[in-house]
Amino acid sequence: MLDQTEGYVTEDGRQIGGVVMEMKNITLRFGGVVAIKDISFDIREGEIRAIIGPNGAGKSSMLNVISGFYIPQEGEVWFRGSKRPPTRPYEVAQQGIARTFQNIALFEGMSVLDNVMTGRLTQMKSSIFHQALWRGKAEAEETANREIAEKIIDFLEIQHIRKTPVARLPYGLKKRVELARALAAEPKLLLLDEPMAGMNVEEKEDMCRFILDVNDEFGTTIALIEHDMGVVMDLSDRVVVMDYGKKIGDGTPDEVRANQEVIDAYLGVSHD
Amino acid sequence: MAQSMTGAGDYQSIPALLHRNASEFGDSPAYREKEFGIWQSWTWSQTEKEIEALALGLINMGVAEGDFIAIIGRNRPYMYWSMVAAQMVGAVPVPLYQDAVAEEMAYVLSHCGARFVIVQDQEQVDKVIEVQDELHQFEHMIYLDPRGLRKYDHTHLHQYSHVQDQGRSAWDELHTELEARQAKLTYDSTCVMLYTSGTTGKPKGVVLSNRNVIESAKASSEFDHLSRDEEILAYLPMAWVGDFIFSIGQAYWTGFCVNCPESADTMMTDLREIGPTYYFAPPRVFETQLTNVMIRMEDAGRLKKRLFDHYMAVARRVGPKILDGEPVGMGDRIAYALGNMLIYGPLKNTLGFTNIRVGYTAGEAIGPEIFDFYRALGINLKQLYGQTEATVFITAQPDGQVRSDTVGVPSPGVEIKIDDNGEVHYRSPGVFVEYYKNAESTAGTKDAEGWVATGDAGFIEQDTGHLRIIDRAKDVGKMASGGMFAPKYVENKLKFYPNILEAVVFGNGRDRCTAFINIDLAAVGNWAERNNIAYASYQELAGHPEVLKAIQGHVEEVNASVAEDAMLSDCQVHRFVVLHKELDADDGELTRTRKVRRRIIEDKYGDIITALYDGSAQVSTSTEVTYEDGRKGAISATLDIRDAAVAPVATKMAAE
């Protein structure tokens, strides 16, 4: 299939680089339940990689393995050329991986700006003591981080809700705020868990545009889980298809679309 | 510049005024823009350097004197600078409405033959690229915001900051050329070309000279005693003459600071933060704000609501008198002061109107209730009457002589006469040079002595000398009965109800009048919510029997008020229909400044008009709509037609 080191060029002419993250023969069990069974795939620098599959296929589990939240019983996770030992989620965040959640996990009582600022947490180096007293480098650090947060607010066009508490926002905007918080960490790899779930057509279009813009503007590698097939096929460069914890397809949207096993499992078998 | 000067002394162009401001008070702020959550500001001397860099960059790219440079974007300092930079190199800036669809842009761009286009972002770049095959003279495009444009073919595409950088590095070789070009600018050079939206036909390019702009800015600044300390918020379309005069003409003449909002959605927050001292808004903006205040008061607690109602009654009674300096009793003054502490002050602060010294509204008639509401709060809101061809000012209301039904006295330097047909004509230093490439229209509008026909019918009040406008002269017609037909007069009365967003009255040459009505979704939607009326769409709400009943009540009240005016009593609305879609500029039904295009509406909705006159109780119709991205679709509906009671007229009985 694809060359391990060289990368490839997408249909719209983007150069995709080498492997950033590789899953090697991952198996994940919860007691007797096998959520993921012997799955291998890679994510390459600068690409938009989708993981799709019917309900219960193990997509979210897969994302949790990537984000370090679940430790697989078997298999290896390779990140940037070295094997990743079992890590805690905050260590993963420090390595440059950020994520959003299927069920929005924002601080509801805090303003949009404060929520986005929490995304900068991993970059803040000054001690609690300094921060509490607003002394020494704490002030300069806050200013620098605020600037980055503001640039992301500008990028995602949420200036008008900067000071609004998140609880008062409609669903579509909350999703955008979550994306903003993830971007605030300036991730190398961005994980999106069902970014379009529960959105109307207009909100989906906006979200698609932002995902593409993030990829284009910051060169962020994006891995996403999504239900909406139309969105997945339009957005992603390569797609992994899962069913009952197994990988049944992997390739460009066109290849996946033509894969009989995928059609049967995900899109349904025709009965004529 | 050695030749003899007129009026404005040594300053015969906007770039000359820029230079004066930069050398006389270079450290005062000239522009502010909120970006990344902070108000960024530029002093006059920084502004001069930025504009100069861009101007050098433009020469470097090959802009010649007399070229037209189209400018498309929202109010940002950079976009204003590009206008002045264009003037500096002897080119003519042509600002375009940023929400215009691609075809509309194509017409204007090809009509003026713009070789260069300066745009704000990807959206505008895409629109120009879409139509560039039709534009034979188009050569280069400069964009401000690089977002999303990295992969575009950059043979004819340039980033604003790069053009400036190239200009800065070419300073040695090009600055003499720039100075030479700037020295050639005189009072008679073209300052700007603005396309009028035009309620009929294609837009016309109005050529305004430096004389027009500077003389108008000077006279109007003196009229309202504007100083360098004013703060204004620039949020109205840059393609509109008003914005050009306020944000460039008056700003450069008096040297005050122009503040640009962060985005269209943050306008209200930015308004509060800046607290402008000089403010302009079309009636629609004041209407929307008042509607919002009223909606929020409906949802407020009982104590707050009672306080609000009580003190607003006080304000309506004495507020305007205090503002006009008329005698007011001690008790009323104390009540008003108390109200100011409890209600008016906080309310003005919320609206961002605390510091307003002079506020203007124009473009359309404003409802007396709306007008009085703001004046009652102590906001010095006034009306002016103007048009692009006059470089805005024809008449304006002096302090202390403000009323909702007149548009004021002739502005300094303006002469006015009313011709035999009742049409208003004016002559002033602001009278435009010509319509570009349209000598026929120029001759039809401006006569040899410099008198310009406004196209509006009106009269001058005998006792006060104030001008009153009745309607567009071409829209004023005759009913079959011989009575006068002035649709706008009735439409304005209808639109003064918060529930009614837009109205179109028909009846020219017929025996009675009928009307189309658009509901205001914000006001009616809130009313529906409070009354537990469920609706899924605009169309459904517009067709709801309760809504129709409420609208019918408004129409009947208007009929009663129209009946009181002997001259216009035949204009009462006998039948009306509430339309299933909002009239929209994208569908060509309104102009970009939201004026009704009667001919187009009459053609498009012919079937409904027929039904209004043939007595049928319902009409089924299908209407084409254009979405923002240019796609077309159709919506169909069955509309109820309602009969409204008409009031008896004093002299003769109405026909029902």
Image: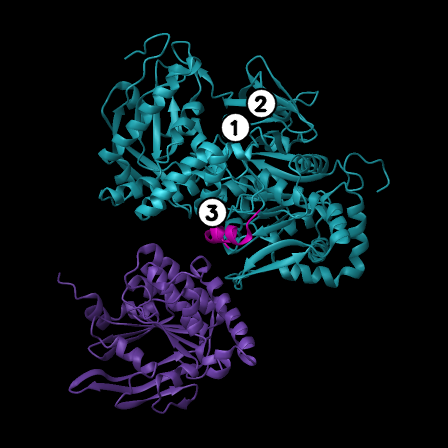
Chain colours: A purple, B cyan
The numbered dot on residue B341 is 3
Q: Residue placed at 47% from the left, 35% from the top? A: B331
Disc 3 versus disc 2: nearer the observer: 3
Q: Percent position (x, y) of residue A88?
A: 35, 87
Outermost residue, front side: B330
Residues under numbered marks 3 and 1 in contact, where contact means CB atoms less than 8 Å apart: no
Using the image, determine if residue B346 lies above or below residue A215.
Answer: above
Helix, strand or loop status at disc 2: loop
Which of the 4 image quadrants contains residue B635? top left
Does residue B239 show up magenta in the picture? Answer: no
Q: Name the residue under label 2.
A: B466
Disc 2 versus disc 1: nearer the observer: 1
Does residue B268 show up magenta in the picture? Answer: yes
| Residue range of the region highlighted in magenta in the rendering | B263-276
Using the image, determine if residue B572 lies above or below residue A134.
Answer: above
Q: How far apart are marks 2 and 1 (CA)?
A: 10 Å
Q: Residue placed at 31% from the left, 39% from the top? A: B524
**SS majority, magenta:** helix
Q: Percent position (x, y) of residue B291?
A: 39, 41
- Which amino acid lies under the numbered mark 2 shown in the image of this protein? His
